[in-house]
Amino acid sequence: MDNRTAIIKQPDNISSFNDVYKLQKIYQEALILDNSNPDFIWIGEHQLCYTLGRGSNYDNLLFSLNEAKYDVFKIDRGGEVTCHMPGQLVTYLVLDLKNFNKDLNWYLRKIEEIIIKILGVFNINCHSRKGFTGVWIGNKKIASIGIGCKRWITINGFSINIDCELENFNKIVPCGIENCLMANMIDYNKNLNIQEVKRIVKKTIEEEFNFDFISK
């Protein structure tokens, strides 16, 4: 597989979800118009918000949409409702699957493998679950995946709970899974920090997709 050029952004500040979502859309449209444009990777943290996929059931939101203290976004991805917040590392991949494999199931399983490799670097044993998308430690979910795709150009990606306020998940039925328990990486490895995890996420994506990263 030939190396692909990808623009990477890794802000240290806590980012607005909507701002980054709009940025992904810009890069997705650029790739649709001209597939010689670079892919785009974003790795960072969001302010507290909740997002719903295209076919999400609003009953999985356990609060009223009239509660102004929660930001809620309906977005272009599969999957149910999830939560983003500081202490959770989010990775978005806007890439052209025509350069890899035009198979969304392959892509989802690939992301699961990437997450498992990342956690393995920190000596955390985790696994995927048949019939579900994401990664678990025992019976607790540590990472969630949600993707969109238009003309084989992907959008959105995955989130890994590093050291976040898991109580925020109590406001939803996470990923539409009843009685879903969530976990933080810090509970299994006290010595890690989010910057080190970010470094490993970047390195793993770079290797798995044969990217040459550039900043812009």
Image: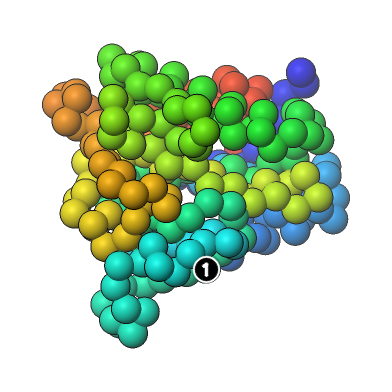
Total number of numbered labels?
1
Where on the picture, by quarter, is residue 72? bottom left
Asked if 108 appears above or below 179 in the picture, the reply is: above
* Residue 32 sits above or below residue 56 on the image: above
Q: Is residue 19 above or below residue 111?
A: below
Q: Is residue 47 visible?
A: no
| Quadrant assignment for the N terminus | top right
Q: Quadrant of residue 142?
A: top left
Q: Residue 35 appears at what percent x and percent y?
A: 83, 44
Q: Residue at x 34, y 56 (%)?
A: 173
Which of 13 and 183 lies nearest the eye of the viewer?
183
Q: Which residue is mark 1?
A: 74
Identity of the amino acid at label 1?
A: Lys
Tell me residue 129's x, y (percent).
Answer: 45, 28
Residue plotted at (29% across, 73% down):
63
Front residue of this view, candidates 179 and 47 = 179
How many C-alpha atoms fall within 10 Å of the one at disc 1: few (<14), some, or many (≥20)? few
Indicate left or right for 185 with 201 as reference. left
